[in-house]
Image (cartoon, grey):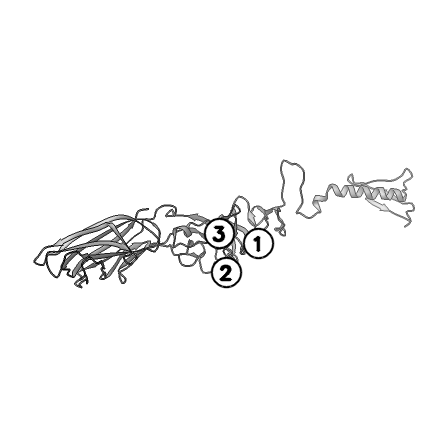
Amino acid sequence: MAIDRGDPNYGTGSAASTNADDINVEDTAGNFTGTEVESVLAEIETSLNAHIGDLADPHQTVTGSTTSVQFNTAVSAPSHSEGLLFYDKDAKVMSFYTDEAEATLNIGTERWVRVVNNTGSTITNGSVVYISGVSSGIPQITKARADSRSTAHSLGVVTHDIENGTEGWLTVAGLVRSLDLSSFSNADTLYLDASTAGELTTTKPSGGDYPVEIGHVLSNSASEGVLFIDLTYPIDTTDVVNNYGEIYTSGNSTVTVATDQNTWYQFLHFDVDGISQGMTPDHTNDHITVLEAGDYKIEATVSFSSDTGNTTYEIQVAKNNGATGFSNIHLERKLGSGGDIGAAQCGGMVTLAANDTIELWIQCTSAAATNPTIRDANLNITRLS
């Protein structure tokens, strides 16, 4: 289109075009006035508006109804704005901005849960957490640790720093980015750590700890590390874990002092910690510590002799330095004369609290109390529920 304005005061001129898309406005004499120029400009504006999508910012606001929307797949991610939906050309998926500017939800490849942090300090990006409560209908989180069933049952990994007293997002499945994973290698399988809350390790927890698999390293960058979250529980931490432990002695020759009749004395000569999981055998202090509350089966096996014959002894299992004796884990044995060595066994089921200690006790019920020698002894505990 060509426009010759002629005189700057809108004198005579012409508008001619050979293009079908151009605007052609002129009077019958080939001239137009100032009013007609305004009309031409208005038509130009209308024509440009019809093609505005080719010229405007690629991040458009769409209103009304439509059967489909074609997003621009070539542009970089826009600046954060809550509620903004766009195509992420790097992740190759639709993405969405929530109220949190530090994280982007990749729709279809990630699952998030909204949570609240009331722990008293910031929970940092990449920390593994579990549900420790509920606040106004929102899960309240605390850093997880693999040394306890309750703290090992992880909900997910936080996907940005969540300050104390604020709400945020964690990833249940998908990718968590912008991490320091430089201490790991790509493709490493990572587990919940049993020593430091919220941390990851390549060492699979064992013994009394809970082997919760968190995910895999996709990039071990020191600042842009990427972790793929895929929580699995080889041992379901909602079920009973078969915890157990034992202490024992064999061939002991040290006498247990039990000179007062009908008085309980703790056996203090265990010398070996047996195998264990989920509890702490301690032959040095001659007891076993259970780490979690539950129902347990306890067994005690002994062989013993005494200074003199024809002496009756009782053996019983007790807890917490003899504070509570278990009458259902109790036996009575009378030794004959002539250096008799008696063997006996007792067992039963009890309910224990976390950190209870279990010991073996003996007393002489004969009128002339004499000291026994427990030659062999085994004290073992197995968790039932």
Q: Amino acid at mark 1?
A: Glu
Percent x, y for residue 268?
23, 61
Q: Secondary structure at mark 1?
A: loop
Tell me the CA gap for discs 2 and 3.
26 Å
Q: CA distance from mark 1 to mark 3?
A: 19 Å
Residue type beneath disc 3: Ile
Residue nearest the observer in this picture, 98 or 186: 98
Whether the residues at callouts 1 and 3 have beta carbons within 8 Å, the answer is no
Residue 260, picture quadrant: bottom left
In this rendering, position of residue 180 left or right of residue 27: left
Q: Is residue 110 visible?
A: no
Q: CA distance from mark 2 to mark 1?
A: 18 Å
Residue type highlighted by circle 2: Ala
Indicate the position of residue 70 as horizontal and vertical percent values. Answer: 63, 41
Q: Which residue is located at x 53 percent, y 43 percent?
A: 108
Q: Secondary structure at mark 3?
A: strand
Disc 2 versus disc 1: nearer the observer: 1
Residue highlighted by disc 2: 222
Mark 3 sits on what residue?
141
Give the image location of residue 128, x and y in percent.
46, 53
